[in-house]
């Protein structure tokens, strides 16, 4: 394989092969189903194009090495001119890359999508040892939260044998304005924030909950500058929560790990826990990047 194929082996390590039990005998194109016929029984050209794109991507992803145009044409059983046009369009979007020997393989945009899927699917398993380490250090419950349709939900929890136990149900949306994981999400996900900002309810939960958009804006700026979030009895009375971000391969916000503490003795205790938590999340982020 040519040395100018920077992502190819990395991509194949993230995408199940045809032999994988996770894929089964059906191909991508097969799972899409046949092109839907028009009223006169002639397949719609748009559906036919989608089917060809699916088969083309399958050909470049599942091959052991980058493919020549003639090999892709053979796999698609389509006119060479049509396949060449599809390849050029997919190159423009970064889904396919052409190397110096005129062979085609997965492009950087497709690889990025694959890594994001892998990260989301495996974040719970990968985060588990870090969460257990944090639980032993803090002596408190540790939670993993992920974005979900404009909210943050807890997807995993490591319980402590003692200390504070809030027993927050997994899968339930957390209030964005009153939780450390919610404030992280708003601070580090600008696109999502712009989309949902006006709809974020500022319902008072305790007497310390932020209930104005101005005060929340100030808090989010502090979070972005500091790199981690903490809430002081804003969602539960007597509870200080600290959260740090986990980043995906592209450096975008993927998840958050939080630790809840009951009545910390000093700011230095909070700062020390935040430093340890941030270091753990940075290590997890590096693992997700394949570093």
Image (cartoon, rainbow, N blue to C red):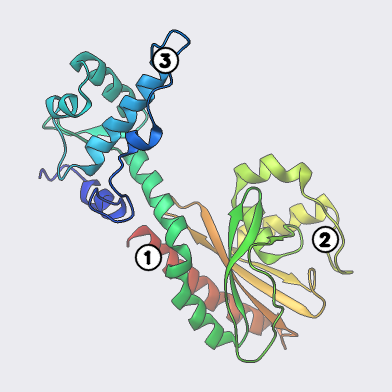
Q: Secondary structure at mark 3?
A: loop
Tell which tag, 3 or 2, sits nearer the viewer. 3
Say which label, 3 or 1, has the lower sequence index.
3
Q: Gap in Å between the C-alphas at discs 2 and 1?
A: 35 Å
Q: Residue at x 67, y 53 (%)?
A: 151
Tell which tag, 2 or 1, sits nearer the viewer. 1
Q: Which residue is mark 3?
A: 44
Q: Secondary structure at mark 1?
A: helix
The x, y position of residue 272, in whole percent, is 59, 81
Query: Which image quadrant is residue 216 in?
Result: bottom right
Instruction: Answer above or below: position of 48 versus 230.
Output: above
Which quadrant would the C terminus be assigned to in this image?
bottom left
Q: Which residue is mark 1?
A: 287
Q: Mark 3, residues whose alpha carbon is within 10 Å: few (<14), some, or many (≥20)?
A: few
Q: Nearer the viewer, residue 194 or 52?
A: 52
Instruction: Answer above or below: position of 271 versus 174.
Output: below
The x, y position of residue 71, in whole percent, is 13, 29
Which quadrant would the N terminus be assigned to in this image?
top left
Does 7 sit left or right of 128 as displayed?
left
The answer to whether marks 3 and 1 mark residues whose Cβ atoms lie closer than 8 Å is: no
Q: Residue at x 53, y 54 (%)?
A: 253
Q: Gap in Å between the C-alphas at discs 3 and 1?
A: 44 Å
Q: Which residue is mark 2?
A: 210
The x, y position of residue 179, in whole percent, is 72, 65
The x, y position of residue 283, in whole percent, is 42, 69
Q: Residue at x 60, y 49 (%)?
A: 189
């Amino acid at each position: 394989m040519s040395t100018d194929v920077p992502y190819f082996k990395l991509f194949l390590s993230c995408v199940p092969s045809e032999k994988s039990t996770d894929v089964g005998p059906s191909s991508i194109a097969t799972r899409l189903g046949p092109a839907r016929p028009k009223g006169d029984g002639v397949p719609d050209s748009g559906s036919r194009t989608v089917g060809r794109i699916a088969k083309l991507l399958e050909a470049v992803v599942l091959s052991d090495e980058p493919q020549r145009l003639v090999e892709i044409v053979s796999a698609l059983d389509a006119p060479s001119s049509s396949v060449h046009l599809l390849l050029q369009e997919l190159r423009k979007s970064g889904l396919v890359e052409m190397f110096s020997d005129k062979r085609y393989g997965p492009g950087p945009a497709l690889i990025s999508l694959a890594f994001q899927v892998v990260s989301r699917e495996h974040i719970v398993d990968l985060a588990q040892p870090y969460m257990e380490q944090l639980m032993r250090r803090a002596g408190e419950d540790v939670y993993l939260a992920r974005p979900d349709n404009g909210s943050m939900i807890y997807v995993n929890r490591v319980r402590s044998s003692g200390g504070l136990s809030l027993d927050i149900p997994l899968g339930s949306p957390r209030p964005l304005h009153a939780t450390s994981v919610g404030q992280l999400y708003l601070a580090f996900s600008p696109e999502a924030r712009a989309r949902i900002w006006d709809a974020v309810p500022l319902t008072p939960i305790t007497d310390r909950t932020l209930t104005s958009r101005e005060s929340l804006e100030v808090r989010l700026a502090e979070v972005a500058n500091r790199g981690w979030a903490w809430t002081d009895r804003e969602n539960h009375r007597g509870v200080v929560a600290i959260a740090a971000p986990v980043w995906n391969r592209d450096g975008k916000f993927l998840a958050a790990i939080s630790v809840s503490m009951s009545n910390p003795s000093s700011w230095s205790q909070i700062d020390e826990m935040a430093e340890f938590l941030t270091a753990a999340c940075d290590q997890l982020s590096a693992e997700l990047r394949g570093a």
